Each structure stands twice: as C-alpha cells, then as structure tokens.
Amino acid sequence: MSTVIASGAATDARAGRSGRGDRWLVGPYYDLAFIIFSSALLLLPHLSHALVKSNVFVDLLVTMLIGGPHLFATYTMTVMEPGFRERYPIYSRGAWLLPVLIVSLAIWNLTLLVTVFFFWASVHVIHQAAFIADAYRMKDPRGWTWTSRAIDYGLLMTCMYPIATAKLMNGEFVTGGRHLLFPSFLKLAWIPGLIWAAFLFFLVGFLVKTVQELRTGRFHGPKTLHMTLATSLFFATPLLRNLDVAFQGLNVWHSFQYLAVVLYLNRLRGEQGLIGSEVVRRVSSRGWKLYGMCLGFTVGAGVALLIVLAIVVRLGAFATGTPMANPIFGTIWSDQHYFAFYSVILSFLLVHYYFDHFIFLGRDREITPTFAPLRRAA
C-alpha cells in the first residue's frame, strides 16, 4: 500500500499543477481505490454467508481480517503515541474505564450492551464519513461554506435512521439473536415521520447544493462521490433482512477505509517529525507492516476471547439461548459465545470509538494533521 501512497502523491503533485490536485486527499488512484470505491468490499460478508450460512462465521471472519486490525490502528495515534498521553493524561486514562463498564453490562444485561454498541457504532461510522468529507473540504483551495458543511453533516446524520428506526420500533431490528431495545416513551406514531422529514430535507438540500456547485464551478467531484456512496449505503443497509451480515458489510468498507486513512496520516506525521514512538514510525513506513502489527493484536484479542469462553463454559454461566457448535468446546450455548465475544471485542472496540471521536474532531494537529502531499516514498 505504501507504493500506492507514493504513486498517489506523485499523481497529486502532477494534478496540482493543473489546479486540481488539492481536491484529492492523497491522489486519484489512492482515493478511488482505498477510500471511495473500496465500498465494493461490502459484498464480501454477503458472499461469505452464501458459502457458509452462519452469522457467527461471518462475524469472526470480518473481525479477524479487517475489523480487528482497523480498531487497533487507532492505538498508533493515541495510546502508543507518547505525545498524546502526555498532553491528554486524563482522557487517555479514562479509556480504560470502558472495559470495566462493558464487562459489567455484559453480565447484567447483554441485550442492552448490544443496543448501546449498535447505536454508538452507527454514530462512529457516520463520524468517520463526516471526517473524510471535511478532509476533502478543508483541502479544497477554493474554500468552503458553513451551509455546505451543515447540509453534508445533516444528510450523513439522518440517512441511516429512517428504516432503522421503524424496525426498532416494530421489534424487527434483530442482531445476534437479540431484538435491540428502543425506549418505550419514544414509540410515538409521529417519530418515524419526523426522521423521514429530516432526512428528506437534507437530501433535497444536498441535491440543490450539488446543482448550484456545478453551475458556479465549485463542484467537488471526490467529496460528492464519497458523500453519495456513503449516504446510499448507510440508507440501504437497514433494509436488508439479515442485519448481522448487512452491517458487517458496512463494517468492511468502514474498516478498510479507516486503515487507508490512518496509514496516510501516520506517514504524514512521520514526515513532519510528529511521531514519538519508534515502533509506530517503523510500522507506518509500509502498509503491510501496519496491517501485520494490528493483525497480531487482533490474534491476541482472539486468544483472550477463547480464554473467557473457556471460563464461561467451565462455570456453566450464561447457559441460555440456543445450542451451537464450537470447533474447540463442542456444543455450547449461544449466549456463552456472545458474552465472550462482546465482552472482549467490545472492550477494545469501544475504546477505539472513544479515541476516534477525538481524532475525527481534528482538535490536535499533531495527531490529525491536515492532509497534504507526501514529499517522498519509502
């Protein structure tokens, strides 16, 4: 992937001479292959499920190959970065309260934990899409307006919920064998209509804005393409019947896109002398090195999951749900699997969300530097 960064940067430099280079984050090839059209990868969980009709298999496959590595990539910009820990000691230490809360909630009410996770996951995915849209916006030499930014934000923040809210209110939003919770005091007949109205308002605003940008010469092709794909896929995903597989499809694109962004930002931070960890500097020199390290962390998390599952099975805890085959422990109860999976994986995942909200807000330019062409290739 580092070779692609170099070629993308070279393309960006050549395009810059024609006044178009700054409209790409890295370069046309890198942006289109790794950030925008990597959306095609969302088909992989559906193809995997067609071959092995098991949601658990799809969950584990996606977590191991891409979901896990992407969440550990966050740590290269936060807990593995001495400067981050020194400047934000309270925020850094606060992250480690999350695993305690997650395991406690998994013991007390696993369905509530899964509900909180799905809501936070949707916000996190939307925040990443908004961050990328902003990265395109801030790099545009023609400048930007708050009206355009507000419309883009509004569209991203509403497009996932028209269908999802109706399913939640009707008890049709099922994942991990659980009907996700929805507050009873919000089960009002006018709530879905309000969400639809907000979504359609911002959708019409986005379409009108795009036409105006075309007419006035301010059209931003890469950003508009990113926004169109994100909005379409966020809206359509809750329509699918198997929501476990559907959201894993969205997760694959989100995770692959995230790895591409973190790799680029770490390379840029390295060039500017902003990386304080020698390990992070070395692994960020090549895409496969960053992925390999994060994959190793994912394997470690998998071992932790197996240890927790072994303890749960040995104690006979959470022996509810439906029987399911496990290649190591034989037949176990589904709730034993989901307790081990969610308590371990979500402990790492929600810490990733916690740090990413800080990263996506771009409050610290040493952690999230402005996108710019790379000066050299390694």
Image (spheres, rainbow, N blue to C red):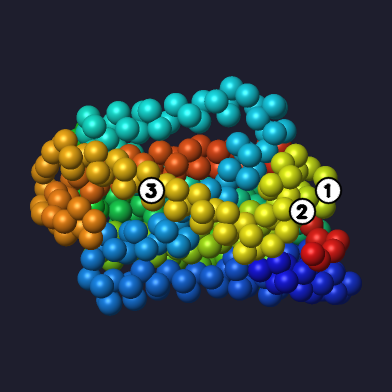
Tell me the SS state at disc 2: helix
Q: In the visual, does 338 lie left or right of 147?
A: left
Question: Which residue is identified by label 1?
Answer: 272
Question: Which residue is identified by label 3?
Answer: 303
Q: Is residue 276 above or below residue 136?
A: above
The answer to the question of whether label 2 and label 1 lie on touching residues, with beta carbons closer than 8 A, is: yes
What's the CA distance linking mark 3 and mark 2? 33 Å
Q: Give the percent coordinates (x, y) of residue 46.
A: 33, 72
- Tell me which label, 3 or 2, sits earlier in the chain: 2
Q: Which mark is residue 268?
A: 2
Q: Residue at x 36, y 28 (%)?
A: 101
Q: Is residue 64 above or below residue 366?
A: below
Q: Count neighbours of disc 2 (C-alpha within 10 A) and say few if under 14, some if 14 to 19, many if 20 or more.
A: many
Tell me where residue 113 sits by quadrant. top left
Q: In the visual, does 133 lie left or right of 365?
A: left
Closer to us: 138 or 279: 279
Q: In the visual, does 331 lie left or right of 160?
A: left
Q: Give the percent coordinates (x, y) of residue 252.
A: 45, 63
* Tag in front: 1 or 3: 3
Residue 237 visible to the viewer: no
What residue type is disc 2 on?
Leu
